[in-house]
Image (tube, rainbow, N blue to C red):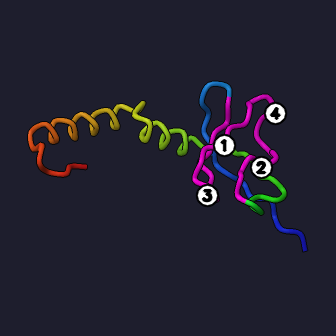
Protein backbone atom coordinates (compact mmCIF):
# COMPACT_ATOMS: atom_id res chain seq x y z
CA UNK A 1 0.00 0.00 0.00
CA UNK A 2 1.36 3.42 -0.95
CA UNK A 3 1.81 6.05 1.72
CA UNK A 4 -0.65 8.93 1.46
CA UNK A 5 0.77 12.27 0.30
CA UNK A 6 0.46 14.73 3.21
CA UNK A 7 -1.26 18.10 2.97
CA UNK A 8 0.52 21.05 4.55
CA UNK A 9 -1.24 24.26 5.53
CA UNK A 10 0.54 27.31 4.22
CA UNK A 11 0.31 31.08 4.10
CA UNK A 12 1.10 33.54 1.34
CA UNK A 13 3.92 36.08 1.37
CA UNK A 14 4.50 38.08 -1.75
CA UNK A 15 4.20 35.64 -4.63
CA UNK A 16 5.03 32.55 -2.57
CA UNK A 17 3.25 29.87 -0.60
CA UNK A 18 5.15 29.38 2.67
CA UNK A 19 4.94 26.78 5.43
CA UNK A 20 6.99 25.83 8.45
CA UNK A 21 8.22 22.28 7.94
CA UNK A 22 7.45 19.76 10.69
CA UNK A 23 10.51 17.72 9.69
CA UNK A 24 13.31 20.32 9.67
CA UNK A 25 11.70 23.36 11.29
CA UNK A 26 12.61 25.57 8.34
CA UNK A 27 10.36 27.52 6.05
CA UNK A 28 9.73 26.14 2.58
CA UNK A 29 8.68 28.40 -0.28
CA UNK A 30 6.78 27.56 -3.47
CA UNK A 31 5.62 29.95 -6.17
CA UNK A 32 1.94 30.80 -6.50
CA UNK A 33 2.00 29.99 -10.22
CA UNK A 34 1.08 26.36 -9.79
CA UNK A 35 -1.73 27.11 -7.34
CA UNK A 36 -2.53 24.84 -4.44
CA UNK A 37 -1.84 21.15 -4.81
CA UNK A 38 1.06 18.75 -5.19
CA UNK A 39 4.67 19.95 -5.01
CA UNK A 40 8.02 18.25 -4.73
CA UNK A 41 9.63 18.51 -1.33
CA UNK A 42 12.28 21.12 -0.55
CA UNK A 43 13.12 19.53 2.81
CA UNK A 44 16.74 18.54 3.42
CA UNK A 45 15.85 15.88 6.01
CA UNK A 46 16.60 12.53 4.41
CA UNK A 47 13.44 10.55 3.76
CA UNK A 48 11.09 13.44 4.58
CA UNK A 49 8.18 13.74 2.18
CA UNK A 50 9.47 11.18 -0.34
CA UNK A 51 6.41 11.73 -2.55
CA UNK A 52 6.19 15.47 -1.94
CA UNK A 53 3.23 17.19 -0.33
CA UNK A 54 0.03 19.01 -1.19
CA UNK A 55 -0.10 22.72 -0.43
CA UNK A 56 -3.31 24.17 0.99
CA UNK A 57 -3.75 27.85 1.79
CA UNK A 58 -4.90 28.36 5.38
CA UNK A 59 -6.19 31.73 6.64
CA UNK A 60 -5.35 30.55 10.18
CA UNK A 61 -1.70 29.94 9.19
CA UNK A 62 -1.63 33.35 7.55
CA UNK A 63 -2.82 35.02 10.76
CA UNK A 64 -0.44 32.93 12.91
CA UNK A 65 2.52 33.86 10.71
CA UNK A 66 1.67 37.56 11.03
CA UNK A 67 1.52 37.26 14.82
CA UNK A 68 4.93 35.58 14.90
CA UNK A 69 6.59 38.01 12.49
CA UNK A 70 5.14 41.07 14.16
CA UNK A 71 2.98 42.26 11.25
CA UNK A 72 -0.22 41.76 13.24
CA UNK A 73 -1.42 44.59 15.56
CA UNK A 74 -1.65 42.25 18.57
CA UNK A 75 1.95 41.13 18.07
CA UNK A 76 3.11 44.75 17.91
CA UNK A 77 1.17 45.58 21.09
CA UNK A 78 2.61 42.54 22.91
CA UNK A 79 6.13 43.37 21.76
CA UNK A 80 5.78 46.97 22.96
CA UNK A 81 4.55 45.76 26.36
CA UNK A 82 7.53 43.41 26.68
CA UNK A 83 9.97 46.16 25.70
CA UNK A 84 8.44 48.49 28.30
CA UNK A 85 8.71 45.80 30.98
CA UNK A 86 12.32 45.06 30.01
CA UNK A 87 13.21 48.75 30.30
CA UNK A 88 11.48 49.03 33.69
CA UNK A 89 13.07 45.84 35.09
CA UNK A 90 16.45 45.48 33.33
CA UNK A 91 17.69 42.80 35.73
CA UNK A 92 14.66 40.52 35.23
CA UNK A 93 13.89 38.14 32.40
CA UNK A 94 10.63 39.14 30.69
CA UNK A 95 8.65 37.41 27.98
Residue located at (77% from left, 52% from top):
53
Q: Secondary structure at mark 3?
A: loop
Identify which residue is drawn at 50% across, 40% down.
65
Residue farthest along the bottom direction in this orientation: 1
Circle 2/circle 1 CB separation < 8 Å: yes
Q: Nearer the viewer, residue 15 or 73?
A: 15
Quadrant (top left, top right, bottom left, bottom right) of the N terminus: bottom right
Comparing 30 with 26, the one in front is: 26
Where residue 42 sits in the image (x, y, percent)?
Answer: 74, 46
Disc 2 and disc 1: Cα gap in Å? 9 Å
Q: How many dots with numbers?
A: 4
Q: Is residue 54 magenta?
A: no
Q: Is the residue under label 4 in contact with that under label 2 (CB below 8 Å)?
A: no
Query: Dot 4: what SS?
Result: helix
Alpha-carbon span between mark 2 and mark 4: 14 Å
| Place of residue 86 in the rendered image (x, y in percent of width and height, measured from the top left) | 16, 41
Q: Is residue 5 above or below residue 16?
A: below
Residue at the image point whose x is 20% and y is 38% from the top: 81
Q: Which stretch appears magenta?
A: 16-45
Question: Callout 2 environment at 10 Å: few (<14), some (14 to 19), or many (20+)?
Answer: some
Q: Which residue is mark 3?
A: 22
Residue mark closest to the camera, 1 vs 4: 1
Could you say which quadrant of the image residue 75 lies in? Answer: top left
Q: Which residue is mark 1?
A: 28
Amino acid sequence: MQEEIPTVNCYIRGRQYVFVCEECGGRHYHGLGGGEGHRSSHCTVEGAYPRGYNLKYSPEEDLRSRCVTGDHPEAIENRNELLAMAAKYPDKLVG
